[in-house]
Amino acid sequence: EFADDINEVIARARAAGVTRILLPNINRDTVRPMLALCQAHPGYLFPMMGLHPEDVAADYSAVLYDNRNGLPTSEANAVVETDEGFIWVGNYSGLIRYDGNSFERVDSATGIASVISLYEDSRRRLWAGTNDGGAVMWDGGSIRGYNKDDGLRSLSVRAITEAEDGIIYLGTTEGVAWIGGDMRLHLVDDPVIRECFVDSLCAGTGNVVYGLTKAGELFTLAGGTLMELYHPHDLGIAG
C-alpha cells in the first residue's frame, strides 16, 4: 500500500516524533520485503515474524524440530536468520546452522560453545554470546573472540545489539561492554551499572540503546556511556 512512498511515510513518522515502528508480516511473501525494509532503517523499523490466520492454508502444518528429526539438541536459547538466509540456533551444546534442509553444528574448536544470545550486525557479521566463554564474532571465514583477557568482567553474555553509530554492545551478568570501530572492547565503567545483570538490549534511534536488568531496571546508553537508569519504582511498576 505504501510501496511507492514508503520513505516519505517513514520521514513523516520521524517528524511526528515516532521513535520506532514494528512491522508485522502477514504471509511468507511479505517476509523478505519486510526484512529488507528493516535493514534499510536499522534501529527504527523492527520486524515481527508471523502468519495472519487468514493466510494460513487449510493444510498448513507446523514442524517441531528436536533431536529426533535433525536438530542435534532439543533446546534453543537464541535463533537468528542472517542475510544470506541461514537460520542459526544457539543452545547449550553450541551453535547450529540450518540451511532449509539440514542442521550442521559449528565446531566448538572455534570457541563458540554454550550459546545464549545471537545477533547479526549491519555489516552482516554474526555475534554469539556464550554462557561462560565471552562473545564471539564471526565475519565470514574470520572468527574473533572476546573474553576476560580483553577486559570482560563476566564471560556470560546475555544480550547483544548494535547502535546506529555502529557500536556493538554486550550485556553481561556484570554490566555492559562495547566494541567500536577499532574492534577493541571497552567497558561502560559506571558504578551504577557495573554490577548489574543485564537481561536484554535493544537499539533505538539517535545512537541510543535501551537495556533491561534482571532486577527490572531500565537504562539507556549512547556513545559507550550510561545516560539514564530507572528503577522499577521510578516507572510505577514496583511490587
Image (cartoon, rainbow, N blue to C red):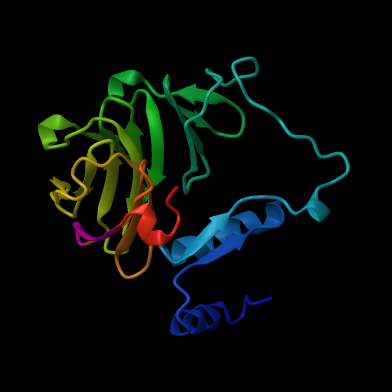
Residue 183, percent from left and from top: 17, 47
Front residue (pair 40, 186) = 186
Magenta: main secondary structure: strand
x 35%, y 43%: residue: 215
Count of numbered tags: 0
**For residue 6, which quarter of the picture?**
bottom right
Is 175 in the magenta?
no
Residue 225 at x, y = what percent? 18, 58
Q: Position of residue 147 (x, y in %)?
A: 18, 31
Q: Toward the viewer: 57 or 173?
A: 173
What residue appears at the point 46 percent right and 61 percent down from the top-left corner?
39
Identify which residue is drawn at 28% across, 44% down.
170
| Residue 226 included in the magenta stretch of the image | yes
Name the quadrant containing residue 231. Answer: bottom left
Q: Which residues are magenta?
A: 223-229
Q: Is residue 125 above or below residue 19?
A: above
The residue positioned farthest toward the right in the image shown: 58
User: Where 171 falls versus 76 (above or below)?
Assistant: below
In the rendered view of the protein, which quadrant contains the N terminus?
Answer: bottom right
- Residue 123 visible within the image: no
Q: Is residue 6 left or right of residue 186?
A: right
x and y percentages locating residue 186 in the rendered image: 14, 47
Q: Residue at x 80, y 48 (%)?
A: 56
- Compared to residue 163, the image places residue 95 above or below, namely above
User: In terms of depth relative to the viewer, which is nearer, 219 or 18?
Assistant: 219
In the rendered structure, the answer to whether residue 185 lies left or right of residue 209 reads: left
Front in this rendered view, residue 134 or 16: 16
